[in-house]
Amino acid sequence: MSDTPISDSTPHNVAELGMLCRRLERGLNEANAIIRQQQLLDEENLRLQDHIKRLEAAGDEVEERLGCGCGCGGPCRACQSASNDWFKAKEAKL
């Protein structure tokens, strides 16, 4: 089997070869556009993953620093509920 079956099957006159070149170029342009879209999506995915990591780190730091920061003197229900919500949100991401 040939490694160029399309051009091998095309009659070898200038007009038909020109049309084949145009079809191949259009296909190449479409493939390049799809590849570029995928690259943009990959870049956006990495950016969002980095953003999530920064948000998680910030949330962990806030939780660590505040403890029960409402001034109640201990772990009150509201602070414990907020802490539980934070852990649930982090687990849901995984």
Image: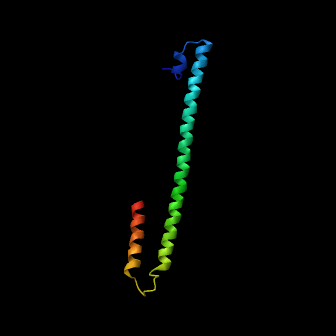
* Rendered location of residue 44, percent (x, y): 54, 51
Which residue is found at the position 42% from the left and 69% from the top?
A: 86
88 vs 26, left or right, is: left
Give the residue furthest to the bottom: 73
Q: Is residue 82 above or below residue 38?
A: below
Residue 50 at x, y = what percent? 53, 59
Coloured how? rainbow
Q: Quadrant of the C terminus?
A: bottom left
In-front residue for pair 39/7? 39
Where 49 sits versus 21, above or below? below
Q: Is residue 31 left or right of residue 81?
A: right
Q: Position of residue 11 (x, y in %)?
A: 55, 12
Image quadrant assignment for residue 89: bottom left
Compared with 76, 55 (above or below) is: above
Name the residue at 55% across, 55% down: 47
Residue placed at 54% from the left, 42% from the top? 37
Residue at point 57%, 36% (across, down): 32
